[in-house]
Image (cartoon, rainbow, N blue to C red):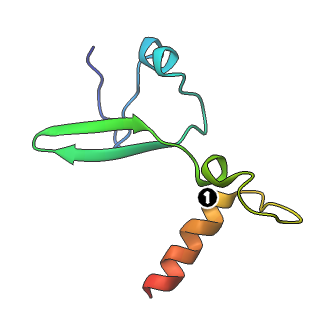
C-alpha cells in the first residue's frame, strides 16, 4: 500500500491496516526510525500499564499526559 504525506506531515494509514491493527482515534503508537524505514507500533498507555498497581483515591483523567508533563519538568 502507498500513502502520501500531506502539507502538515501527516500520513493516512489505510483503513485495512488500521482495522488489522485495531487502531482507532486516540490509540497510542510509538514511531521509530531504523535506517530508511519508519516503524510504527501500537503502544500501551501508561494508564493501562499501571492500572491496579497503585492504591489511589482517583486516577488522573489522562495519566499519560500527567507522566509526560512530569518527565518534561524533571528534564528542565
| Residue 34 position (above or below residue 23) | below
Mark 1 highlights which residue?
Answer: 64
Sort mark 1 into few (<14), some (14-19) or many (20+) by Cα contacts within 10 Å.
some
Residue 58 at x, y percent in the picture: 86, 62
Decide if residue 60 is on the left or right side of residue 26: right
Q: Residue at x 24, y 39 (%)?
A: 38
Decide if residue 9 is on the left or right side of residue 54: left
Which image quadrant is residue 70 in?
bottom right
Q: Residue at x 48, y 42 (%)?
A: 43
- Identify the element where label 1 is drawn: helix
Q: Residue at x 59, y 67 (%)?
A: 67
- Total marks drawn? 1
Residue found at the very far right of the displayed protein: 57
Q: Quadrant of the N terminus?
A: top left
Residue 61 at x, y percent in the picture: 78, 57
Whether residue 22 is visible to the viewer of this picture, yes or no, is: yes
Residue found at the very far bottom of the displayed protein: 76
In this view of the protein, which residue sits in the foreground, 1 or 64? 64
Amino acid at each position: 500500500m502507498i500513502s502520501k504525506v500531506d502539507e502538515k506531515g501527516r500520513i493516512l494509514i489505510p483503513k485495512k491496516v488500521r482495522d488489522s491493527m485495531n487502531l482507532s482515534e486516540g490509540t497510542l503508537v510509538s514511531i521509530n526510525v531504523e535506517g530508511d524505514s519508519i516503524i510504527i507500533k501500537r503502544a500501551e498507555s501508561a494508564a493501562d500499564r499501571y492500572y491496579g498497581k497503585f492504591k489511589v483515591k482517583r486516577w488522573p483523567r489522562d495519566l499519560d499526559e500527567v507522566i509526560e508533563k512530569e518527565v518534561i519538568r524533571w528534564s528542565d
